[in-house]
Amino acid sequence: MSKIIYGERIGKTTPLVVACDGVIFDGTKHKILLTKRTDNGKWCLPGGKMEPGESASECCVSEVLEETGLAVAVERLVGVYSSPGCIVEYTDGNRKQGVDLLFEAAIIGCDIRTTEETTDVGYFPIEKMGSLEIMELMKERISDAYEFRTVAFLR
């Protein structure tokens, strides 16, 4: 389980970690695909840490595949999230300030399933998300995705 810690420029105390998340809408653009994490039981957008030698879009594609079984193509950048006043601390004591890129992605191959990292996968409308236990940092990103802006958010 991880926790979020807030503080004035607390990011100075940790390494930066780049990660990419994918927002995948259903055909009506009313529901978003969420995954339920095995490590903390909370719902989130599929995504994860960028590996050396990987581009941001490649990271998004590989993380969505790894967590959902879906092959996707990146369509647009929704936002960049990099608050220096917010870090994540993991149960093993590791901490990080995230630089997270959120991409809208479209399914190009379908084999939706749970994986080692997920216990459930499903589409949810924003109205239903209030009753789900969603990871705190994902709430703003989900809201941003529903704005359907052509210019990315910089947060």
Image: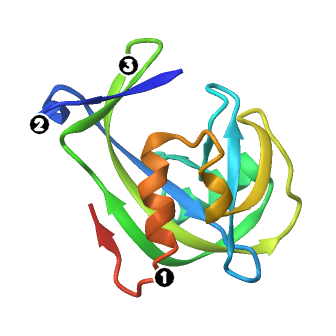
Amino acid type indicated by mark 3: Asn
Looking at the rendered image, the quarter that the N terminus falls into is top right
For image coordinates 35% across by 76% down, the residue present is 152
Q: As displayed, is residue 25 above or below residue 10?
A: below
**Considering only order in the chain, which callout, 2 or 3, is on the residue closer to the N terminus?**
2
Residue 117 visible, this orientation: yes
- Point out the frontmost of discs 1 and 3: 1
Give the camera-side residue of 104 and 135. Answer: 135
3D distance between C-alphas at marks 2 and 1: 30 Å
- Judging by the rendered image, the residue that carries numbered circle 1 is 148
Q: Position of residue 59 (x, y in %)?
A: 54, 56
3D distance between C-alphas at marks 1 and 3: 35 Å
- Judging by the rendered image, the residue that carries numbered circle 2 is 9
Secondary structure found at label 3: loop
**Considering only order in the chain, which callout, 1 or 2, is on the residue closer to the N terminus?**
2
- Point out the frontmost of discs 3 and 2: 2
Q: Position of residue 112 (x, y in %)?
A: 85, 57
Give the camera-side residue of 144 and 19. Answer: 144
